[in-house]
Amino acid sequence: GAVVSQHPSWVICKSGTSVKIECRSLDFQATTMFWYRQFPKQSLMLMATSNEGSKATYEQGVEKDKFLINHASLTLSTLTVTSAHPEDSSFYICSARSNRGRGSLSEAFFGQGTRLTVV
Amino acid sequence: GQSLEQPSEVTAVEGAIVQINCTYQTSGFYGLSWYQQHDGGAPTFLSYNALDGLEETGRFSSFLSRSDSYGYLLLQELQMKDSASYFCAVGSGNTGKLIFGQGTTLQVKP
């Protein structure tokens, strides 16, 4: 299957600092990527849809000024958590769909996830 | 909006068969998917149904009934490594984004 790489896999940062998370599609081009957040023992909550060459589309309740998304190329989307606070500590996961195989709507490929801890 | 319901926990023994149900409410339907997630890991794709019926992939099968807004994941010949969380998800719009259920924690016992 297609490969999505996410970096870093874990990060610890001080409260008030910013953290950038990268999501790369390694063997396919992704005009659209998705960012999810998952708290312990909970489901994946969609934060935003990252669109190559245009602004991201944020889900209701997600602060776009706090979670900056940039999708500057067909293989890279970044999520920057600005002025991080302890309540932002979570597991952040990106995904992308490949237009190969059974069609673009059938299978999403996920990055490894980034565990963010804000202290 | 969209919502999905699935049981929070299921326990079964090795070698058994377990079925995880999922009911959904969605405006527009773009398929029902199933993902497995082990503790600390990322979700991995298991199965997808766009049309009614059964899809079989090895030990895992998934079923969909669009008229009932219902689907299930069937796991056969359970192994200890199948202990994980299982999420059903529906596609939302034609952008490819997914809305996930709350997840079912499967515990496989010897």
Image (cartoon, rainbow, N blue to C red):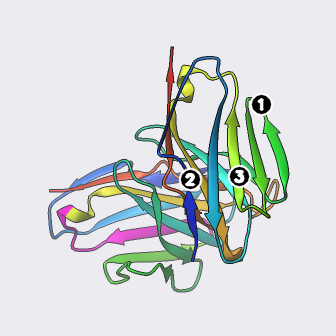
Packing grade of label 3 (10 A; few <14, some 14-19, many >=20) is many
Look at mark 2 in the image and give the residue it sits on: A110
Look at mark 3 in the image and give the residue it sits on: B71
Give the SS element for disc 1: loop
Image position, residue A101 (x, y; %): 81, 53
- In the image, is A80 to the left or to the right of B18? left
Query: For the residues marked 1 and 2, what is the alpha-carbon distance in whole angstroms?
Result: 22 Å
Q: What amino acid type should be assigned to the residue bearing mark 3?
A: Gly
Give the SS element for disc 2: strand
- Closest to the observer, A21 or B105: B105
- Residue at 68% over, 54% down: B33
Image position, residue A105 (x, y; %): 74, 64
- Residue A30's place in the image compared with B57, above or below, is below
- Closest to the observer, A33 or A91: A91
Q: Which mark is residue A58?
A: none
Between marks 3 and 1 in the image, the one whose residue lies nearer the viewer: 3
- In the image, is B99 to the left or to the right of A7? right
Callouts 1 and 2 on one subunit: no
Magenta part of the chain: A74-86
Look at mark 1 in the image and give the residue it sits on: B58
Q: What amino acid type should be assigned to the residue bearing mark 1?
A: Gly
Query: For the residues marked 3 and 1, what is the alpha-carbon distance in whole angstroms?
Result: 18 Å
